[in-house]
Amino acid sequence: MATVAQPLRIAIDVDGGDHGAAVTLPAAAQFLARRPDAHLVLVGTEASLASAVKIIPVSVAGRVSHVIATEVVGMDESPALSLKNKKNSSLRLALNAVKDGQAAACVSAGNTGALMATARFVLKTLPGIDRPAIASLLPTHKGHGKEGDGGVLMLDLGANVDCTPEHLRQFAIMGAALSSALTDKPRPTVALLNIGEEEIKGNDIVKEAAELIRATDLNFIGNVEGTDVFRGTADVVVCDGFVGNVALKASEGIVKLMAQMLREEFARTPLTKAVAALAYPILKRFKARIDPSQHNGATLLGLRGIVIKSHGGTDAFGFSNAIERAYNEIRHDLIAELTERVAAMNTTAPAAAVSAS
């Protein structure tokens, strides 16, 4: 992988998300403290940036620059209307910083639809890519979902609810490139999420997608079921955005249910409370392994620039991990890697696949 030599500059949508600057600025300070080679471009309203002086330590303030925005995109705003009417929003100006070369990546906890629509308009898609996809590393039995430790990369997680077989082929190519960058595996295994492992299972779109992916030089292992995702059966799991988002939200719900049930059972009697105290170190480690903020940050994959979507309700620790995701993708020169891989795949792809829409 190529290593980027210039200072790593990342644009931060300060006002995006449920909590805005109250989370993004402390996260920026945490990130700068552990990454002395990074520079952050903070994009926000005057009021938000004024508080940055109090939150960002003087020791790292020299690696921070400000861009003033006059608008903020609400979490419930229409993506189309925000794209049309809020050209001076913190979200839009952070993406403009990537387009103009002021930053190599953008991180936002803002409105997902608005971020995707605006990013696609401002940055455009890579050659050979029809639609960007949302991709994220999730924890598995083999790892915690952090860079380099064996998490599973899953895409699409909600950007494209209706996909053609060719779109799924493109997701597989992009997912393999991102997995290589984040985990340093030269040939990550790729699988399609399906209702069964057998080739005869699934709808026509998934069956045709399997044939297209099999025709590439990806390390394709076929179909996997939902139970395989968190086992680490494959390094990359591909699906359309409808299926991916449902699977992701269902898994998040199960984690919350398990945590609530554990709290209730340990609080049931004086004896169980005593057992909970003894088990506290184990429970703490368990919580750390499943804590969403540990692996916060999804990549909007397929754009001509690095864009990371943070969970809107995350805390400062979680948002700093999203910035870390951007840092690693810049460091591995992800856009060049993706461009090269997509071009190589398309030169050898069946004519029907390349012409599909």
Image (cartoon, rainbow, N blue to C red):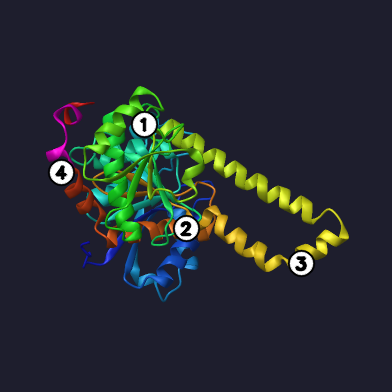
The mark closer to the camera, 2 or 3, is 2
Asked if marks 4 and 3 touch (Cβ < 8 Å), the reply is no
Residue position for label 2: 142
Q: Which mark is residue 199?
A: 1
Q: Which residues are magenta?
A: 344-353
User: Which kind of residue does numbered mark 4 sit on?
Assistant: Ala
Q: Residue furthest top?
A: 204
Q: Secondary structure at mark 1?
A: loop
Q: Is residue 181 above or below residue 92?
A: below
On the picture, is 68 further left or further right than 2? right
Q: Secondary structure at mark 2?
A: loop
Residue position for label 3: 277
* Residue in the image at 49% along x and 55% along y: 21
User: Which kind of residue does numbered mark 2 sit on?
Assistant: Lys
Q: Is residue 218 above or below residue 294?
A: above
User: Which kind of residue does numbered mark 1 sit on?
Assistant: Glu
Residue position for label 4: 343
Tell me if residue 75 can be seen: no
**Along the viewing direction, whichever of 40 and 332 lies nearer the viewer:** 332
The mark closer to the camera, 4 or 2, is 2
**Along the viewing direction, whichever of 12 and 205 lies nearer the viewer:** 205
Name which quarter of the figure residue 53 lies in.
Answer: bottom left
